[in-house]
Image (cartoon, rainbow, N blue to C red):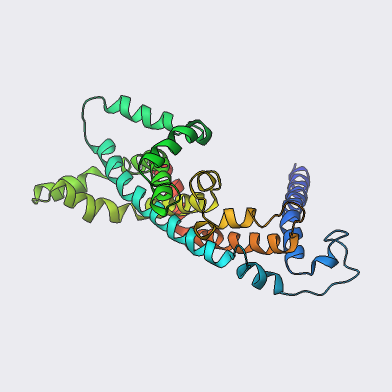
Amino acid sequence: MTKKVEIRQIISIILAIFIGVLWSLPIVGVIMVAIRPISEVLNGWWDFSSFHPTIENFFSVWTHSTLPLGRAIVNSIIIASFATIIPIFIAALAAYGFARFSFPIKTYLFIFLVMMMAMPQQMVAIPLFQILVDLHLIDTYPGLILVHSAWGLPWIILFLRNFFKTLPVEIEEAARVDGASDFQIFLQIVLPMSLPAILSVVALQFTWVWNDFFFALLIIYTPDNYVATQALAWLKGKYHTPWDLMSAGALIVMVTPVLVYAILQKYYTRGMIGWVGKG
């Protein structure tokens, strides 16, 4: 019996290593193309008959004459930051209301919010574009931030509402007896206790906005306002594709969300599984 278990464990480990290596191959390929001159990878990145690593591709794409990725990265940071902070604050207020208070059509309103999560972006593209045109928000940062904020509200409300329901009500009742208002309880008690969940939302929402291409393509038209995903896509020309620059740019764009997850990993894990464990 013990030998059978050991054999199964060995097979599982070998299979996991094989899947991990297979999963990592595309990333390795991108790295190899990014750190080598394009002439060395014309026959495939796995051809190491000539290998002269360089970081020139990173500098070239960062300061590109037509679409400098450095400027696009700054645009993405601005948009992703505001499109994360704004919906989290609004959704936290709404989620606390759903978790702690009773009001008419509460259940139906919550079901409506959950159903909105299933709506594809393409379904709202045309009416959304018309609304932004009427509001003179096309090709502006506020327009894109507003769209991302509104699109993130349903899932953030659902996530935080579930977390708030796991918090002990007794602490809030004790503060209310001492004369604290509902808003004071929310700001001074509920939010500090919900830090793991909030930081989990920060990681998810920031990464989603950072990686978005559809809404950016729909709303932003001026090259100076391009976000990182747009600038990276437009590096591809009609007759020529600079794979070396696009690979280097892809790695640069990928660094920011990876750093966000690395910094918030501890809180992200606690926020994602904490309320399940308490339930």
The spot of residue 120 in percent (x, y) is 51, 33
Nearest the camera: 238 or 38?
Answer: 238
- Residue 153 placement, left or right of 8: left
Quadrant housing residue 55: bottom right
- The quarter of the picture where the C terminus appears is top left
Q: Is residue 172 left or right of residue 88?
A: left
Q: Nearer the viewer, residue 235 or 243?
A: 235
- Tell me where residue 189 appears, x and y as whole percent: 23, 53
Q: Going by the image, does 97 lie left or right of 266?
A: left
Query: Residue at left 80%, top 65%?
Result: 38
Q: Is residue 124 above or below residue 203?
A: above
Count of labels shown?
A: 0
Q: Residue furthest right?
A: 49
Rendered position, 234 above or below 100: below
Q: What percent of the width, then of the height, locates residue 74?
A: 49, 64
Q: Is residue 37 left or right of residue 152?
A: right
Whether residue 233 is visible: yes
Whole-percent x, y for residue 153 in the image: 38, 41
- Of the 4 image quadrants, the one containing the N terminus is top right
- Using the rendered image of the protein, determine whether residue 159 is visible from the camera's viewpoint: no
